[in-house]
Image (cartoon, rainbow, N blue to C red):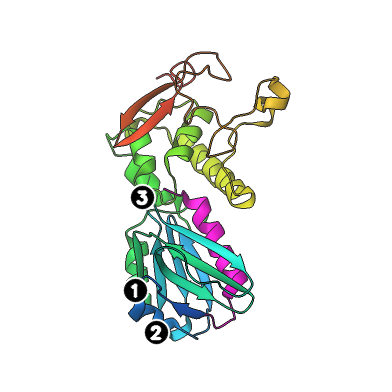
Amino acid sequence: MPEGHTIHRLAADCARAFAGAAPRATSPQGKFSDGAALLDGQPMTGADAHGKHLFLAFGGTGRVHIHLGLYGTFRFGTGPAPAPVGQVRLRLATPETYADLRGPTRCELLTDDEVRAVAARLGPDPLRADADPERAWARISRSRTPVAALLMDQKVVAGVGNVYRAEVLFRHGIDPYRPGRELARHEWDALWADLAALMREGVRLGRIDTVRPEHTPEVMGRPPRVDDHGGEVYVYRRAAQPCHICGGEIRTADLAARNLFWCPGCQSR
């Protein structure tokens, strides 16, 4: 599932492509035909993201709420839109550019009040200027749940996925199984600040890089990471490989129905 930085990039891409324009809106697949008919030819007034949720605003018509889920994609092309290929839930098109949405978990037209209700169910997003990390701390500081599970709970922190949670805990030497209430306030403040910085870089670069300058392949003289996800990381999807810092073996286990990665040597209690 795409993490929050990907959705914020999509919001920026949509704004650049369509904000101020009145794109044609269609649903070649047919599952969003009624919503597309209402949007068709209406000016897009903005695009926004909160965690893993994308919102496209169309003046007084409402906002399209999109959640890509595990299989959704939102791809852009230039020039006149060709005949749609595959199951396109929503196509937005101008003479200069087009975007095709396929396979989302959610694609629905909401009122402003309904959008606010969606946002109210989410935790603070480190990439948003209006985020209040105090809300997340209030839940974490009294929870017996492992901090690694809390960071993945979108009601606690919005936008953090499997990669960012594993990497930020490693960067701060925090055992992923430590209960949230055992986290010190200064540790939470450092985690939040680091998440915001790492995710902003993710928006800028379009990939997740989490290793510090002194641990890059060039500096350490090691081979670069080869992985479909790209980016240099410390522990994510590196199970049974040596830790870049201590040389110990990276471990993996199931936690909250997702694969957790950590280094027992660097992240001890």
Q: Which residue is mark 3?
A: 154
What residue occupies the far left of the structure in this picture?
A: 144
Give the answer, above or below, for where 129 lies relative to 239: below
- Mark 2: which secondary structure? helix
Q: Which amino acid, mark 1?
A: Gly
Q: Which residue is mark 2?
A: 38
| Magenta stretch, main secondary structure class | helix
Q: Is residue 143 left or right of residue 82?
A: left
Residue at 42% from the left image edge and 32% from the top image edge: 184
Q: Earlier in the sequence, mark 3 or mark 2?
A: 2
What's drawn in magenta, residue-wise?
1-23
Q: Nearer the viewer, mark 3 or mark 2?
A: 2
- Picture coordinates of residue 250 (x, y %)? 46, 20
Q: Residues within 10 Å of mark 3 (few under 14, many from 20)?
A: some
Q: Which residue is more in the foreground, 174 or 109?
A: 109
Q: Earlier in the sequence, mark 3 or mark 1?
A: 1
Q: Which residue is mark 1?
A: 30
Q: Earlier in the sequence, mark 2 or mark 1?
A: 1
Q: Which amino acid, mark 2?
A: Leu
Q: Can I make out residue 126 in this image?
A: no
Is residue 15 part of the magenta span, yes or no? Answer: yes
- Mark 1: which secondary structure? loop
Is residue 141 part of the magenta span, yes or no? Answer: no
Q: Which residue is more in the foreground, 65 or 245?
A: 65
Q: Which residue is more in the foreground, 30 or 15?
A: 30
Q: Which amino acid, mark 3?
A: Gln
Q: Residues within 10 Å of mark 1 (few under 14, many from 20)?
A: few
